[in-house]
Amino acid sequence: MAAAARKAAVAKKAAAAKRTAKNSAGSGTGKRAPSKVPAEKTAASGTAAKRAASGTAAKKAVSAKKLTPAKKSAPAKKTAPAKKSAPAKKSASVKKAVPAEVSPARITPAKPPRGESHTALVRRARRIDRELADVYPYAHPELDFENPFQLVVATVLSAQTTDLRVNQTTPALFAKYPTPEDLAAADPEEVEEILRPTGFFRAKTKSVMGLSKALRDDFGGEVPGRLEDLVKLPGVGRKTAFVVLGNAFGRPGITVDTHFQRLVRRWQWTDAKEPDKIEAAVGELFPKTGWTMLSHHVIFHGRRICHARKPACGACPIAPLCPAYGEGETDPEKAKKLLKYEKGGFPGQRLNPPQAYLDAGGIPAPPLGAPGAGSPVSGSPARGTG
């Protein structure tokens, strides 16, 4: 029994030793384990760090994405007013473009600058005359005449009436008194009766009979071709003299009638009001050889388009050059209704106009006594050139 007890004790001790050995072996492994465990932990922590880093990067990316729209939206906010202002600029351009489609002349009439030089004035004035020459290539004196005597008489009679009325009256006068001698010896009452339709017939009778006597007594029955001689005739001033010189003798002269005075002031060629000063000022702007045709161009335009009371600005071919654009009707359709003579389809002033006028569509005036001849054929009467 004792021996068995001893064997059991030894067996226990051996078993305990084995357990101890195993434990010691296990503890060695455990020493290694700690080295493995930190590595795992390090790996885990590295992974965690990577995840954290990726998470941080993701957060940064997210924040970057959040910030990016903010940055984009910031310029959008800045550009938003620009977009709003852009239409305003477009609308402004549209406002400018609308009148331009109608007529450039209606937006930018050429107003001469303050202190315009003489050279600039000359260029502007001559350009206007060139434009008028293109519009009225058939411009001519609008009094019917066959010789200098008929022209000087007709010009004197044209004061305070229309050339049309003079042209309707002179055929009977010249048929009965064809020469200065005949008219000088006429019965004043008979002449008055003929001239009655022209108005102021008594004063005009005195003038035409007086100049006829002067031609008979002082110039051998011939009309003189010099300014200083013409102005000595009764009823003949510089204006009438230049009409005769330019159209009967081919000697240049400026005819400063009411139309001429009105237009040259509207165009700011001069601010003078006296005819002789206007004549001198305008004469400096043009070569002398062109004075007669210049007069015709200006007077034609004044009678047909640039009227005294209602200028047809909307139908004016020189509107872009006119400083006074806008004083009259600017609507093209309404302005067309204001046109006179051949421009408006009405008969002209002359019963026997030049062929060039007829070729351009001009209509001869009706004789006195013809249907419609007793009333103005072209609206309000225009002043004559005498």
Image: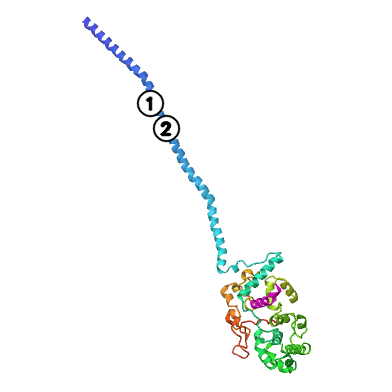
Above or below, 331 against 386 in this view is: above
Of 25 and 308, which appears nearest the observer? 308
How many labels were placed on the picture?
Answer: 2
Residue occupied by mark 1: 40
Q: Residues within 10 Å of mark 1 (few under 14, many from 20)?
A: few
Q: Where does residue 112 sit, x and y in percent of width and height?
A: 67, 66
Residue 295 covered by magenta stretch: yes
Above or below, 181 against 349 in this view is: below
- Quarter of the C terminus within the rendering: bottom right
Q: Amino acid at mark 1?
A: Glu
Q: Main secondary structure of the magenta part?
A: helix
Q: Where does residue 49 sit, x and y in percent of width and height?
A: 43, 31
Mark 1 to mark 2 CA distance (whole Å):
15 Å
Q: Is residue 48 left or right of residue 373?
A: left
- The residue at 73%/92% (across/down) is 183
Residue occupied by mark 2: 50
Q: Quadrant of residue 119?
A: bottom right
Q: Quadrant of residue 347?
A: bottom right
Of 152 and 37, which appears nearest the observer? 152
Q: What range is drawn magenta here? A: 287-302
- Quarter of the N terminus within the rendering: top left
> Which element type, helix, strand or loop, lies under badge 2?
helix
Q: Is residue 316 left or right of residue 15?
A: right
Of labels 1 and 2, earlier in sequence is 1
Q: Where does residue 266 sit, x and y in percent of width and height?
A: 68, 72
Q: Amino acid at mark 2?
A: Lys
